[in-house]
Structures are given as structure tokens and as C-alpha cells.
Amino acid sequence: MSVTANRKGPQMEKREVLTEKHAYWRGFMIRLNDMVNTREYGQFLFNCRHDLSFSTKILKSLPNIDVEGSIEYLKSKGGFCDCEVLMNID
Ligand SMILES: [Zn+2]
């Protein structure tokens, strides 16, 4: 009987960092924009909480995405909060 006790986690789980080149990028930006900029009775509402909470929420909902790595990537591009991701990247 072979023992592989020290190997844990799902096998061959592929995690990708979300960048502008990723297939999900466009959808990510559209969803982020919809969460940060909403409209009510013709008035624009700005919902950025000065953190990456919306970005994190969307990233977590995407399959096979390295959430932490993607957050690091967004920060490296000047996106330190959700509205900065929309303004500084893309
Ligand atoms: Zn912001």
C-alpha cells in the first residue's frame, strides 16, 4: 500500500491570475463597474469603499482564479481600491 499522506488539496487544481489578457477580464471589469457605479433616479451613485472588497467578491465567484495573486496583480497596476482598478487598469 502506498502512502501519499502529505499530499493535500484537490488534484491538478489550476489557478490563474486574472490579468487583462484573461478571458474573464472583460466580464470582471463590467461586473466591477456595475457594483462601484450604480444609478438611482437618474443620479449616479459611487459605492467604492476604498478597498478591494467588490473585486475580491467577484474574483472569488470566478472558477480557477488565484484570488490573492489577482489582488496582488491589481495592486501592482495601481488598483488599490475598486474604483482605482476601474480607472487605472484596462
Ligand atoms: Zn476607490
Image (cartoon, grey):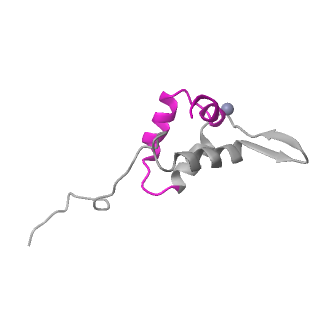
Taking the magenta stretch, the answer to whether it contains residue 88 is yes
User: From the viewer's perspective, is residue 9 above or below residue 16?
Assistant: below
The percent position of residue 39, horizontal first and vertical second, equals 82, 46
Left or right: residue 81 compared with residue 74: right
**Quarter of the figure with the N terminus:** bottom left
User: From the viewer's perspective, is residue 60 above or below residue 20?
Assistant: below
**Quarter of the figure with the C terminus:** top right
The percent position of residue 83, horizontal first and vertical second, equals 66, 34
Relative depth, front residue between 47 and 32 = 32
Q: Which residues are magenta?
A: 62-90
Q: Quadrant of ligand 1?
A: top right
Residue at 55% over, 26% down: 78
The percent position of residue 49, horizontal first and vertical second, equals 69, 37
Q: Which residue appears farthest toward the bottom when viewing the image?
A: 1
Q: Quadrant of residue 44?
A: top right
Residue at 16% over, 63% down: 4
Left or right: residue 12 compared with residue 81: left
The percent position of residue 72, horizontal first and vertical second, equals 46, 35
Relative depth, front residue between 54 and 42 = 42
Q: Which residue appears farthest toward the right when viewing the image?
A: 41
